[in-house]
C-alpha cells in the first residue's frame, strides 16, 4: 500500500481516481488544484504524486518541480488530455515517471501507478 496524493481539477476524474486507487489498497488524498497539493505536501509525506498537468492556480508542471525539490524520493506521475502538454512534461524526464494520456481506463491508470511505485 502506498500513500498517494492526487491533484486533479475535474471533480469526476478526481473522485474516480480516488475510488479506484483506494480499491487497489492505497491510502489516497485528493485535492482540486496545485496550490492545495503544495499545502498537502508541506503537511505530509507521500510515496506518489499523481497530478494533472493543466490545472488552475499552480499547474502540474510547476507542482512537480516544487514537489521534487521538497521530496526527491517521491515518485511523480502526470496525466493530461493535451498532446502539447505531454511534450512539455517530457522535458522533465529526470523528475517524472511517466505521462498518462486522458482518457484512460481505471486499469490503465492503476497499472501506471503500480509501475511508478515499483521502478
Image (cartoon, rainbow, N blue to C red):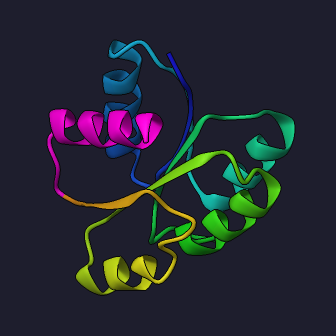
Classify the position of the C terminus by image quarter.
Answer: top left
Query: The magenta stretch spans which residues?
Result: 103-119
Q: Nearer the viewer, residue 6 or 32?
A: 6
**Residue 78 vs residue 63: left or right?**
left
Asked whether, in this view, residue 9 is left or right of residue 41, the answer is: left
Query: Which residue of the protein is positioned furthest toward the front in this rendering?
Result: 119
Q: Quarter-wise, where is residue 63 in the image?
A: bottom right
Foreground of the two, 63 or 19:
63
Q: Which residue sits at x=41%, y=41%? A: 14
Predominant secondary structure, magenta span: helix
- Of 13 and 83, nearer the camera is 83
Q: Residue shown at 34%/16% (left/top)?
A: 24
Q: Residue drawn at (37%, 25%), measured in percent from left and top?
A: 21
Instruction: Say which quarter of the image contains residue 47.
Output: top right
Q: Nearer the viewer, residue 116 or 79?
A: 116
Total numbered labels placed on residues in the image: 0
On screen, 11 above or below 93?
Answer: above
In the image, is 3 to the left or to the right of 83? right
Q: Position of residue 92 (x, y in %)?
A: 52, 76
Place of residue 49 in the rendered image (x, y in percent of width and height, measured from the top left): 56, 46
Rendered image quadrant of residue 114: top left
Q: Position of residue 2 (x, y in %)?
A: 54, 23
Q: Is 35 located above or below residue 106 in the figure?
A: below
Expressed as whole percent of the image width and height from the top left, the position of residue 94 reads: 54, 70
Residue 82 lies in the magenta stretch:
no
Q: Is residue 78 above or below residue 41?
A: below
| Point 85% across, 36% down: residue | 43
Amino acid at each position: 500500500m502506498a500513500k498517494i496524493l492526487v491533484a486533479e481539477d475535474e471533480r469526476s476524474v478526481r473522485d474516480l481516481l480516488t475510488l479506484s486507487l483506494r480499491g487497489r489498497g492505497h491510502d489516497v488524498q485528493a485535492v482540486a488544484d496545485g496550490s492545495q497539493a503544495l499545502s498537502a505536501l508541506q503537511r505530509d509525506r507521500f510515496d506518489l504524486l499523481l497530478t494533472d498537468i493543466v490545472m488552475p492556480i499552480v499547474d502540474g508542471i510547476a507542482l512537480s518541480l516544487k514537489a521534487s525539490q521538497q521530496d526527491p524520493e517521491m515518485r511523480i506521475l502526470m496525466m493530461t488530455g493535451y498532446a502539447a502538454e505531454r511534450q512539455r512534461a517530457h522535458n522533465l524526464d529526470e523528475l517524472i515517471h511517466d505521462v498518462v494520456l486522458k482518457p484512460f481506463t481505471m486499469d490503465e491508470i492503476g497499472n501506471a501507478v503500480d509501475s511508478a511505485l515499483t521502478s
